[in-house]
Image (spheres, helix red, strand yellow):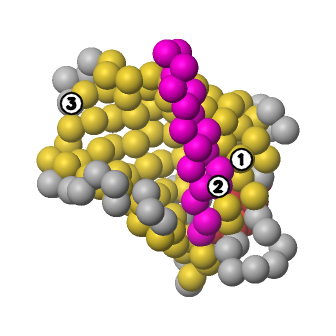
Amino acid sequence: MDDPDIMDLCRPHAGCWRGHYRHFDAEGALVDAHESEILNEFPAQGEFAYVQTSRFFWADGRHERHVFPGRLVANRLIWETERLRGVAFTSRHAPQAMFLRFARVDLPGIEILEMIEADHGAGIRMRSWQWRKDGQPFRRTIVDERRVW
């Protein structure tokens, strides 16, 4: 049995998702929380099969915006941006889940494994991140999102 087609799994994620990020240290203490708006697009032409625009908003008024264009290569989405480099993949052992392994270019030594599952009928996504610095676990992130369009 082959791994699921990544684009078949990704396309239902098209649209805008609003959510809440919560970051915890290795002992489980909350170290950061913020709101998000994630726009997932699938251009009909051009070099990128997927473009994600992420906007983050903190209660103290800070905000960030990042764009992550991804190329489709051998059933994988590949990112190479100023903020991260990584790959999204699927597994036949978890056919409804998508996985991302990426390194933070702006934070040397940081690698993250993300798992995403969605209930498209309910319009929700659940995401979790496992952070490692120089190979050692140091943070976990939980993201709950709801589709807004």
Residue 102 pos. (x, y %):
39, 60
Between residues 42 and 59, which one lies in front from this camera angle?
59
* Residue type beneath disc 1: Leu
Residue shown at 21% from the left, 30% from the top: 26
Above/below status of 23 relative to 52: above
Give me the C-alpha separation between circle 3 and circle 2: 28 Å
Q: Considering the numbered disc 1 on the image, is that residue within a helix, a strand or a loop?
A: strand
Residue shown at 60% from the left, 76% from the top: 71
Q: Considering the numbered disc 3 on the image, is that residue within a helix, a strand or a loop?
A: loop
Give me the C-alpha separation between circle 3 and circle 1: 30 Å
- The magenta-colored residue range is 52-70
Left or right of 38 in this view: 58:
left
Residue shown at 27% from the left, 35% from the top: 139
- Give the numbered dot on residue 26: 3
Residue shown at 23% from the left, 48% from the top: 132
- Give the numbered dot on residue 52: 2
The residue to which callout 1 is attached is 39
Do the numbered discs 2 and 1 sit on residues whose CB atoms are within 8 Å? yes
Q: Magenta segment, principal secondary structure?
A: strand
3 or 2: mark nearer the eye:
2
